[in-house]
């Protein structure tokens, strides 16, 4: 892929998870050089300009001599690389490498081309700097995490490469890459930015899209297993309150349930209404759909933005300080997605209860053919309930908190990295909850003698290849984990074939 000004979410995933190689475009290199020329003229002229020949944060008024500018940038990186916690997953670090390069490619950061080129060289080689997860407050960007990323560029810290964590200098040497000696402005340009938040959100959005489709599938399977009505999913009914998400989810449900043999078999059953967890799927899942659409719009903008400070305007020769590094747009987005994704788990757990409770389902208790001796899937619902309850704590908005930093120079911060990391946790929980619903719904369908709608039936048959029908109690955890792999990978959703 040739990297220029913009990056779609699909591009991002192909590189971060698919391993597609990236290189700078000629146009990007030209923009970078023009901005760099501005920085070099300022250094030669001697005027004090923040970020170039001054201290940082509260030390912005301290002038630094030209003979100390390399040391200034070195000191900035090593002093800021004080993050803590477990290392971020490799895919998150890959996203940070890519997004930091994209921002620098806009030609308003004042670095040399060597800087984004080394970022991309590490990315292309599968060499991932070790970045502790905690330490960002999401205001002057993700300072501590990005400092750990930058640390590897100057040959310090550690890099995970070939399955081993080794000193960065050793990995760079093995890859025939020279560590950078940072010049004026370059260290600051590397650490002022929102790339941890952006990477976490990009990955989460891709996973949440798959999860939403799979939750629609699980709901459709539960509808079939419980002789639920298809009428609430009619286009004309949902169209009377046409939120885009509700319309889209109802369409997917109709697709999954098409040509059902089960639905006409109970047309005259006398049942008046289904519970909300079945009947209101378009409205509840649809709200999540719309939240994902809004998040996609935010990320489209963020993935084509310049987020460091100060910013260089080559046409006028100006270097201007601003607040593009502030994480609030991503922080609010992460919090909104936390709630939206958590709700998929909340309603899914309620559908599990509908399937397992014999007073509600009309099926054997906990879907055990021989209850009493066997407990069936009783405790599967406990696990779902535990995860849903934990999500209620994680979904509390991180962005409403702020703790001033840098002697009150940075007096309002976003806490966006907190929210984005919590979102990743919530996603994992809901992937498991939806897997539990599918486990229960497939078992409930075993009591049916007719074929479900085409999409549901295809998914059911694939589930049965991984998870055999439960005739009597067994060790269920391997069944759940195998099914969860089908959910997370998107294989089950692709097989069912919703739009």
Image (spheres, helix red, strand yellow):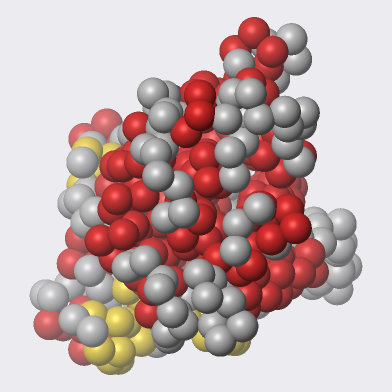
User: How many numbered circles does the render carry?
Assistant: 0
Q: Residue at x 47, y 33 (%)?
A: 262
**Front-lying residue, 233 or 486:** 233
Q: Quadrant of the C terminus?
A: top left
From the top left corner, tell me how far across and down residue 90 is, in percent: 37, 71
Asked whether the viewer can see residue 71, the reply is no
Toward which corner of the image does residue 81 lie, by quadrant?
bottom right
In the image, residue 85 above or below residue 376: below
| Figure quadrant of residue 288 | top right
* 334 vs 379, nearest the viewer: 379
149 left or right of 291 in image? left
User: Looking at the picture, how far across and down is residue 217, in whole percent?
Assistant: 48, 42
Residue 170, relative to residue 451: is it above or below? below
Of 350 and 247, nearer the camera is 350
Q: Position of residue 255 (x, y in %)?
A: 43, 25
Instruction: Give left or right: position of 36 versus 169.
Output: right
State the residue at coordinates (11%, 75%).
Answer: 176
x, y percent for residue 421 = 61, 66
Residue 352 in the figure: left or right of residue 208:
right
Q: Quadrant of the N terminus?
A: top left
Q: Residue at coordinates 53% horizontally, 71% vertically from top-left?
A: 368
Q: Is residue 160 among what the camera can see? A: yes
Which residue is nearer to you in this view: 475 or 112?
475
Q: Compared to 358, does 36 lie above or below?
A: above
**Residue drawn at (30%, 89%) of the image:** 165
């Amino acid at each position: 892929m040739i990297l220029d000004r913009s990056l779609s979410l699909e591009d991002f995933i192909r590189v971060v998870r698919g391993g597609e190689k990236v290189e700078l475009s000629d146009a990007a290199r030209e923009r970078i050089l023009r901005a760099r020329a501005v920085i070099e003229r300022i250094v030669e002229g001697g005027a004090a300009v923040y970020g170039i020949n001054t201290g940082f944060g509260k030390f912005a008024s301290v002038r630094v001599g030209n003979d100390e500018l390399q040391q200034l940038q070195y000191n900035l990186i090593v002093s800021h690389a004080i993050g803590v916690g477990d290392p971020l997953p490799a895919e998150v670090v890959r996203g940070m490498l890519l997004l930091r390069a994209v921002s620098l490619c806009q030609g308003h950061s004042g670095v040399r081309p060597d800087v984004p080129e080394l970022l991309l060289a590490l990315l292309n080689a599968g060499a991932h700097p070790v970045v502790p997860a905690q330490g960002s407050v999401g205001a002057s960007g993700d300072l501590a995490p990005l400092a750990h990323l930058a640390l590897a560029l100057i040959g310090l810290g550690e890099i995970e490469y070939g399955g081993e964590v080794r000193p960065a200098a050793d990995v760079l040497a093995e890859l025939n890459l020279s560590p950078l000696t940072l010049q004026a402005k370059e260290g600051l340009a590397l650490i002022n930015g929102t790339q941890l938040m952006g990477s976490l959100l990009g990955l989460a959005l891709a996973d949440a899209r798959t999860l939403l489709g799979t939750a629609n599938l699980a709901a459709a399977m539960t509808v079939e297993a419980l002789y639920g009505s298809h009428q609430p999913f009619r286009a004309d009914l949902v169209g009377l309150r046409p939120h885009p998400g509700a319309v889209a989810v109802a369409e997917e449900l109709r697709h999954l349930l098409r040509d059902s043999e089960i639905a006409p078999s109970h047309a005259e059953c006398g049942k008046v209404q289904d519970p909300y967890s079945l009947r209101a799927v378009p409205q509840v899942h649809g709200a999540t759909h719309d939240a994902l659409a809004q998040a996609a719009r935010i990320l489209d903008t963020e993935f084509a933005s310049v987020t460091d400070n100060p910013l260089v305007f080559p046409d006028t020769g100006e270097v201007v300080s601003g607040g593009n590094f502030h994480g609030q747009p991503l922080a609010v987005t992460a919090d909104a997605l936390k709630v939206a994704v958590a709700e998929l788990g909340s309603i899914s757990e309620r559908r599990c209860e509908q399937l397992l409770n014999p007073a509600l389902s009309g099926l054997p208790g906990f879907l055990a053919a021989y209850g009493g001796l066997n407990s069936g899937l009783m405790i599967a619902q406990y696990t779902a309930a535990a995860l849903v309850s934990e999500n209620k704590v994680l979904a509390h908005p991180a962005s409403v908190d702020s703790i001033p930093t840098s002697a009150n120079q940075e007096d309002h911060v976003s806490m966006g990295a907190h929210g984005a990391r919590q979102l990743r946790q919530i996603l994992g929980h809901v992937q498991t909850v939806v897997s539990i619903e599918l486990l229960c719904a497939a078992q409930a369908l075993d009591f049916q003698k007719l074929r479900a709608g085409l999409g549901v039936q295809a998914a059911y048959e694939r589930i049965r290849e991984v998870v055999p029908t439960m005739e009597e109690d067994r060790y269920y955890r391997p069944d759940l984990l195998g099914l969860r792999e089908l959910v997370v990978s998107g294989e089950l959703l692709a097989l069912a074939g919703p739009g």
